[in-house]
Amino acid sequence: MPEAAAQGSGQPAPLAAFGPGRVNLIGEHTDYNGGLALPFAIAQGVVVRAAASDDLVVRAHATDLGEQFAFAVSQREREHGWRAFVLGMVAELHALGVEVEGAFLEIGGDLPRGAGLSSSAALEVALCLALLELAGIDPERLGHVQLARVCARVENEWAGAQTGLLDQLASLCGEQDRALLIDFAALAREQPAIEQVPMQLDGWRLLVLDSGERHEHAGGGYNERRAECAQACRELGVATLSEADEAQLGRLPGALARRARHVLGENRRVTGAVEALREHDMPALGALLDESHASLRDDYEISTPAVEAAVARLRDAGAAGARLIGGGFGGSVLGLFAEDAQPPPEAREVRPSRGAHLLGG
Ligand code: GLA
């Protein structure tokens, strides 16, 4: 326990860092395709409590799993599950020149794992902020984009999931009552890429429902979709699928053409959703959520029977629009409900909330 470790040992007081989960309103599987997305950070997240130790050992405790793990800060042999994230974060910070001299870490929070609300990015971000603070480095000095890249490298290189930057940026940059319009093509060009979009829902509500199916990016179809998109780019001679021309898609084999069609359509739907929010046109936003889901199911082919059942449950309860969110192959679904609708009792309301930060006290 960090508190116990710090007490009477002359160590600095323990600190706590919070990394929120995220919901992507719309713009799915566009991040690694140079497209647009519109996520927001949610109030639920991962908390990492940390205290320094100067024996070059990191001792971590995942409270929800009741598991512990200790490793030398110089260890580079791979680990699995949550351990891969802790080890990877220490290694990636070292590569960046941040000296982690040892730490006691306690990992908790209220974000379910594998439910499609980005518990991995929330963990990475909370770990990153906690370890930077222990090392006396102001995260502002590095900037959100660089921090997101460090966190994503942990996911890509250490946890084996070839995910993009969507979740980490949402967790780091979230703002209360705002969604983040992220332009991943601008981001790749190192240009300003994030615009805050006010989310006034006028009494309407967004709720997530867990499909009950756990998803696992490293072992799932996510990496396969990424490889298909890379293949489609090679065949079309474009750097990203967002640069492809709709008229070219006929040159691609069926499955690759469907993947590309999803990306181009999804980018348009993100732009449409921003407009719907600006015009307070909630039915239009709902229709876009439905269209996004149909495209993810039919063209991107990442839905499952459990996900379809969850979407149907939200629609049967009167959702004006519902869709799967995140990587797919399980996880949560999102529904938009009018003020007087009666969402299923097990669905949980989500609101755009503040991004990652240190907790006081
Ligand atoms: C997961 C990945 C993100 C993104 C989404 C799909 O959440 O971590 O990078 O690709 O899937 O939009």
Image (cartoon, rainbow, N blue to C red):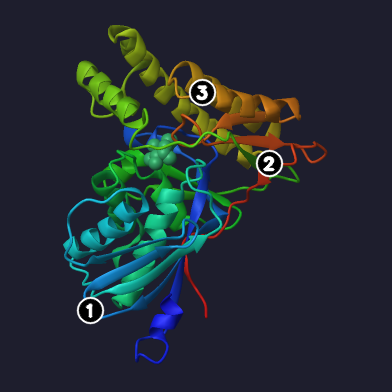
Determine the secondary structure under disc 2: loop
At label 2, the amino acid type is Ala
Label 1, on which residue?
A: 55
Nearest the eye: 1 or 208 = 1
Q: Earlier in the sequence, mark 2 or mark 3?
A: 3
The label on residue 304 is 3
Relative side of 45 to 321, left or right: left
Position of residue 261 relative to residue 160, above or below, is above
x and y percentages locating residue 295 in the rendered image:
50, 20
Determine the secondary structure under disc 3: loop
Give the residue drawn at x 31%, y 31%.
223
Q: Earlier in the sequence, mark 1 or mark 3?
A: 1
At label 3, the amino acid type is Thr
* Disc 1: CA contacts within 10 A as few (<14), some (14-19) or many (>=20): few
Position of residue 225 relative to residue 183, above or below, is above
Relative side of 40 to 225, left or right: right
CA–CA distance in space, label 1 to label 2 = 46 Å
Label 2, on which residue?
A: 347
Give the residue drawn at x 32%, y 79%.
52
Give the residue drawn at x 53%, y 53%.
111
